[in-house]
Amino acid sequence: MAIFPHIEIEAIVQENDKIRIKCDKSFVSKDEAAITLVEIEPLAANGFIDVTGSSYKDWYLDWEYATEGTITVSCRVTTDGSPTTITKDLEVISAANDKLFSADSDLVLHKSDVLKYLPDGKSSFLYLHRRAQDRIVRWVDDMGYRDINGDKFTKDDFIDLTEVKDWSTFMVLAMIMDDLSNAVDDVFDRDHMQFKEKAFSASNKAVLRLDYDGDGLQEDGEHINMSSVRMFRR
């Protein structure tokens, strides 16, 4: 007999941004009694909250965290005996330390109704802005650019974020439309392709002002002129 709690959360969430803690993948072995109670503790010593509901679809908790730090989330599952509990860590980060290259307000400028497509359990598209940021930083790495010490550039090395705002914005819009599309050439697929093309165009126009020597300042020569770099669509 065995109980298998499962927690599904993002690795990183920004302060005061809604996150959904999901335990709906929890299950028991065939020789175990049925699940009678599912509880989630959003942070250690905060107390468990009953999320059992009428079906496994209710086994989640929406939450926000006010301060940054490493948070321990717990899921406790009970059948007819002693409960089984598992934990998972979540990093809560401030907006300043997240240093995202674009924001939801930038999306609205190009598609006014975009926020109506927010998934359940989300109050923003910050998770996609973070994904776009990761892709841009990874592109710099893939192209072989390094600082004066030969180390990879990080998001903190991007000095002028205005240069990557459009690139990130259109990349996020393309991802949103791609998630919504369920058929080739439907309206969302067409929007996806349009925003993907705009993201590519914005990337070609960007001048990436990077901190090559780690002094936190923008100096002559510390940049990548994207118009002179040969890029390929992906």
Image (cartoon, rainbow, N blue to C red):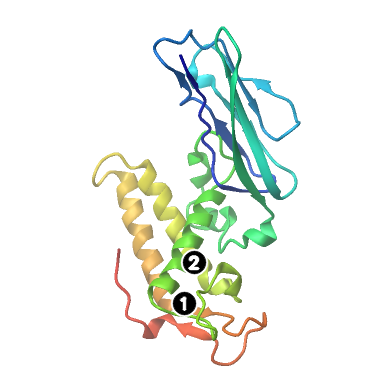
**Could you tell me which residue is drawn at 32 percent across and 75 percent down?**
231
Residue at figure coordinates x 75%, y 30% from the top left: 46
Give the answer, above or below, for where 67 lies relative to 225: above
Instruction: Looking at the picture, tell me which residue is in the foreground, 195 or 121.
Output: 121
Residue type at mark 2? Asp
Q: Which residue is mark 2?
A: 166
Front residue of this view, candidates 228 and 83: 83
Q: Badge 2, how many Cα within 10 Å: few under 14, some, many 20+?
A: many
Identify residue for label 1. 206
Residue 18 picture quarter: top right
Separation (CA) of disc 2 from disc 1? 9 Å
User: Residue 94 location in percent, x, y?
Assistant: 69, 55
* Side of 229 where 137 appears, left or right: right
Between 56 and 177, the one nearer to me in the picture: 56
Please state the horizontal and vertical placement of residue 223, each as a whole percent of the image.
Answer: 52, 84
Name the spot of residue 55 as percent of width and height, x first: 49, 14
